[in-house]
Amino acid sequence: MAKSRISNRVGDGLEIGDTSTRGTKQRGRKRIRPKTEESQKLTMILYPREIFVIDDIIAKAKKKSGATVVLRRAAIIRALINWLHTSGPDITDAKDEDGILAILQDFSNDKLRK
């Protein structure tokens, strides 16, 4: 039988509600950016190949830096969104995902030519 953190059995020295055996770790994920603005949770569905691309970027960054990089999938997606918002191409004329990709490729090709 596994020993629980909080017990009410006689003789174990703990009272109901005693939290003395609990760790002091903070629950939840470690905050990686300062809370400068409100955030909302969003669930996205990505294809395995898209997840592979993001994970490959993370693995390469860790390899280059000697595993000192703390890069997360969400950070990559947020950075791309912020880049689109601040200096990326205007994708509002796109009708679908293929249209967005075409605009991004044209933008990238234009930048390489300059």
Image (cartoon, grey):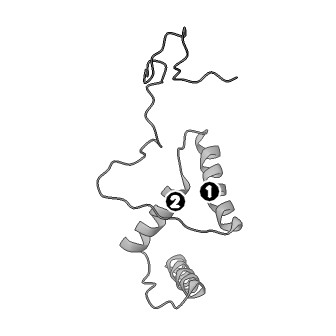
Disc 1 element: helix
Nearest the camera: 110 or 5? 5
Q: Residue 65: x percent and y percent?
A: 58, 42
Name which residue lies at 54% across and 23% down.
Answer: 5
Q: Earlier in the sequence, mark 1 or mark 2?
A: 1
Q: Residue 106: x percent and y percent?
A: 54, 84
Q: Is residue 57 visible?
A: yes
Name which residue lies at 55% across and 16% down.
Answer: 9
Name which residue lies at 67% across and 24% down.
Answer: 2
Q: Residue 38: x percent and y percent?
A: 31, 58
* Marker disc for residue 57: 1
Circle 1: residue type: Ile
Q: Residue furthest left?
A: 36
Q: Which residue is mark 2?
A: 76
* Marker disc for residue 9: none
Circle 2: residue type: Ile
Residue 5 horizontal side relative to residue 19, left or right = right
Residue 108 in which image quadrant: bottom right
Residue 1 horizontal side relative to residue 4, left or right = right
Q: Is residue 27 above or below residue 105?
A: above
| Mark 1 and mark 2 residues within 8 Å of each other at the beta carbon | yes
The residue carrying pointer 2 sits among few (fewer than 14), some (14 to 19) or many (20 or more) residues within 10 Å by Cα, namely some
Q: Is residue 34 above or below residue 68?
A: below
Nearest the camera: 65 or 36? 36
Q: Is residue 87 visible?
A: no
Q: Residue 97: x percent and y percent?
A: 57, 83
Nearest the camera: 8 or 54? 8
Mark pair 1, 2: CA separation: 9 Å
The quarter in which the N terminus is drawn is top right
Name which residue lies at 44% across and 80% down.
Answer: 89
